[in-house]
Amino acid sequence: MPEATPFPAEYTAVLTGAGSKRGIGRATADRLAREGWAVAVMDINGENAKAVAQEIAEAYGVKTIGVGADVSDQSAVNAAVDEVEAGMPPVVGLVNLAGISSPTTFMDETAEGWDRVFAINMRGTFLVTQRVLRGMIDRQLGRIVSISSISAERGGGTYSKVAYSASKAAIIGFTRALAREMGVHNISVNAVAPGPIDTDIMGGTLTGERKAEMSAGTMLGRVGQPEEVAALIAFLLSPDAGYITAATYDINGGLQVS
Ligand code: NAP
């Protein structure tokens, strides 16, 4: 029977899309650093990525690095991961958070708009994951979490429309199929599907009125906080979560069932 590879003394989590101040990625970077992970922040905005990395290093005393890369650009992704691997402890965790929303209704959608959403939300997840997996397979240890959305499960009903829902549904199929291939390498692959979370991705900071509107169908009567999603992701990356794979975790205040 295969044995689970233990975590090394020091280990790094790579987080894409962790450069924005009020995002789920930033909250996850804080949470993981607090739990002792070394943190690599990858974002399209390299300055933001470096600033977040520095703030986290100062706050938690862990090793960090900030790298700029458009996740849909393979050579940029490869260069960024090369830099992480050269300067950081072994990469054990990957969280694919980089994403864009898309409020365009279907009959107004263009091929360019559609491709852009898929390029970042899905192709980006593919490129970063495949590159990071090389080292994980060598070490026979890895935890991968990608961010889907309740929009994939309910068929929209959120700020974003069909292109976004379809790209986030793709993340669920990607997760399950990749988990099947990676199990033999002691690498878990999971997805997290948040409901409405209080970030700026849905066209800017949410007003009180928009929060009320978005939380109307939830059982808890409120939107979620990035820190709440971060806690779930951190658990799925932890040594304790080694037997969880191919799962999609809902975190939506009950919206999916209500
Ligand atoms: P966010 O703060 O806007 O985070 C998205 C991050 O991705 C930003 O830092 C953004 O950088 C970065 N990014 C955009 N395009 C990129 C690219 N091509 N390459 C690399 N990085 C790129 O929003 P969030 O709400 O935390 O979203 C995080 C993830 O959760 C997304 O995948 C989103 O779809 C998903 N999600 C969010 C909610 C929600 O209600 N907030 C619900 C379900 C799922 P810039 O800021 O510089 O553009």
Image: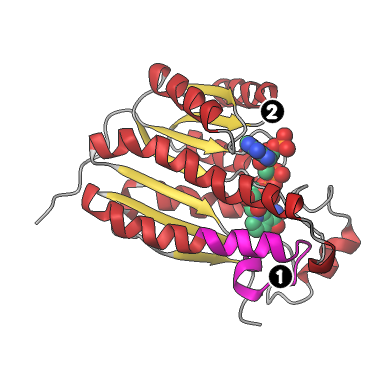
- Total numbered circles: 2
Q: Nearer the viewer, residue 46 or 249?
A: 46
Residue 100 visible in the picture: yes
Which of the 4 quarters of the picture holds residue 108? Answer: bottom right
User: Which residue is at 52% across, 22% downward?
Assistant: 65
Which of the 4 quarters of the picture holds residue 157? Answer: bottom right
Q: Are marks 2 and 1 in contact (CB under 8 Å)?
A: no
In x, y percent, where is residue 233? 49, 51
Q: Is residue 154 magenta?
A: yes
Please say if 209 is above or below 22: below
Q: Is residue 127 magenta?
A: no
Magenta residue span: 149-171
Badge 2 density bin: few <14, some 14–19, many ≥20, Cα 10 Å = some
In x, y percent, where is residue 21? 71, 36
The residue that disc 1 covers is: 156
SS for dot 1: loop
Please say if 125 is above or below 254: above
User: Which residue is at 57% across, 23% downward?
Assistant: 66
In x, y percent, where is residue 55? 62, 23
Instruction: Say which mark, if any, is on residue 129.
Output: none
Looking at the rendering, in which quadrant would you find the C terminus? bottom right
- Amino acid carrying mark 1 in the image: Gly
Looking at the rendering, in which quadrant would you find the N terminus? bottom left
- Amino acid carrying mark 2 in the image: Asn
Q: Main secondary structure of the magenta part?
A: helix
The residue that disc 2 covers is: 45
